[in-house]
Amino acid sequence: MKKLPPTGTVEVAPSILSADFSSLSEHISQIESCVNILHIDVMDGHFVPNISFGPVVIKKIRPHSKLFFDTHLMISEPAKYADEFVKAGSDNITFHLEAVSDPAEVIKVIRDLGVSVGISIKPKTPVESLESVIADVDMVLLMTVEPGFGGQSFIPESVERCQQLKKMLRPDQRLEVDGGIDCDTAPKIVAAGADTLVAGSAVFAQKEPAKAVQDIQKAAAVLT
Ligand code: DX5
Ligand code: ZN
C-alpha cells in the first residue's frame, strides 16, 4: 500500500475523469513522472447525477502506474463498496459526508482496510458539519464545484471555506480541493490553505498533459 505524501508540499492530482478512457494507461503514463497522486472519480448515478466506472477499471490500470491512487467515491453506500476499491488498488478512499448517517463508522471501516481515509463535502455543506470527525481522517476534500461532472467553473466562495477548513485541520492532514482548478484558481486556493489540487480538464483535456501539470505546479508555487 502506498502512503499519502506527507504534508509540506503542494501536490497536483490529475483526475482521470477527463482522460481518454479508450487509452487510459497511455494517458496516465504521460503524467506519471510529474506527479505523486492520481485522482480517481467514482460516480454511481445516485449520489450524483452521473455514472463513471467501478473497481474493475482501477484494477486494470493499477499495474500500469506507481502513483498513489486517490479514489473519490461519489456513491451512496461507501462502506459497502470500500473493500472492493481497496482490493482493486486504491491507496486512499474518500467518501462524502452527505452520503452517510454515521461518518465515524465509515472512517473505521476504511481505516481497517489499511488505506488512508478522506472525507469530502459538497459546496453547500457547512464546513462545521465536519467538526466531530475531522480529527480522524488523513485528508479533507473540499468540493469547489458540485460533484458529478468535470469541466465546471470554480465556485469563488470556496476560497473562504478553504480558509475555515485549514484552521480546523492539524498540520499533518491534507486539504484537497476538487473542481475548476487551473492556473488561475490554483494560486488562490493554495493561498487559502489547500495543498492537494485535483485537476481534470486542466490536465487531461490539454494537448500536452505533462506541460499542463507543470504549469499548474508553477502557478500554485507563486504564493507558497
Ligand atoms: C467532479 C470530480 C472531479 C472532476 C474535476 O465531480 O470530483 O474530480 O474530475 O474536473 P475538473 O478539474 O475538470 O473540474
Ligand atoms: Zn474528484
Image (cartoon, rainbow, N blue to C red):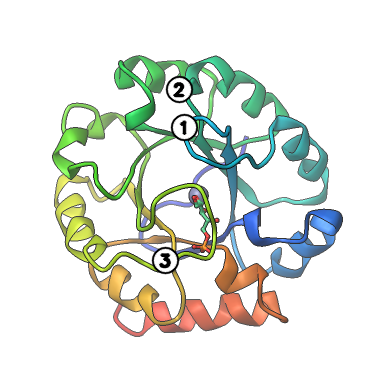
Position of the N terminus by quadrant: top right
Comes first in the chain, label 2 or label 1: 1
Comes first in the chain, label 3 or label 2: 3
What residue is drawn where x is 60% and y is 79%? 212
**Rendered location of residue 26, percent (x, y):** 84, 62
Query: Could you tell me the amino acid type at mark 1?
Result: Phe
**Rendered location of residue 166, percent (x, y):** 20, 54
Q: Secondary structure at mark 2?
A: helix
Q: CA distance from mark 3 to mark 2?
A: 24 Å
Q: Nearer the viewer, residue 138 or 127?
A: 127
Q: Secondary structure at mark 3?
A: loop
Comes first in the chain, label 3 or label 1: 3
Mark nearest the camera among 2 and 1 is 1
Query: Could you tell me the amino acid type at mark 3?
Result: Val
Circle 2 residues within 10 Å: few <14, some 14–19, many ≥20 = some
Position of the C terminus by quadrant: bottom left
Q: Nearer the viewer, residue 124 or 183?
A: 124
Residue 107 as seen in the image, left or right of residue 64: left
Query: Could you tell me the amino acid type at mark 2?
Result: Arg
What residue is drawn where x is 66% and y is 78%? 206
The answer to which quarter of the image holds residue 119 is top left
Q: CA distance from mark 3 to mark 1?
A: 29 Å
Q: Nearer the viewer, residue 133 or 155?
A: 155
Q: Report the disc number at residue 47.
A: 1
**Rendered location of residue 188, percent (x, y):** 29, 75
Residue 20 as seen in the image, left or right of residue 1: right
Q: Secondary structure at mark 1?
A: loop
Q: CA distance from mark 2 to mark 1?
A: 22 Å
Q: Find out if the beta carbon at label 2 lies less than 8 Å from the nearest ligand 2 atom.
A: no
Tag 2 residue: 111
Tag 3 residue: 10
The answer to which quarter of the image holds residue 52 is top right
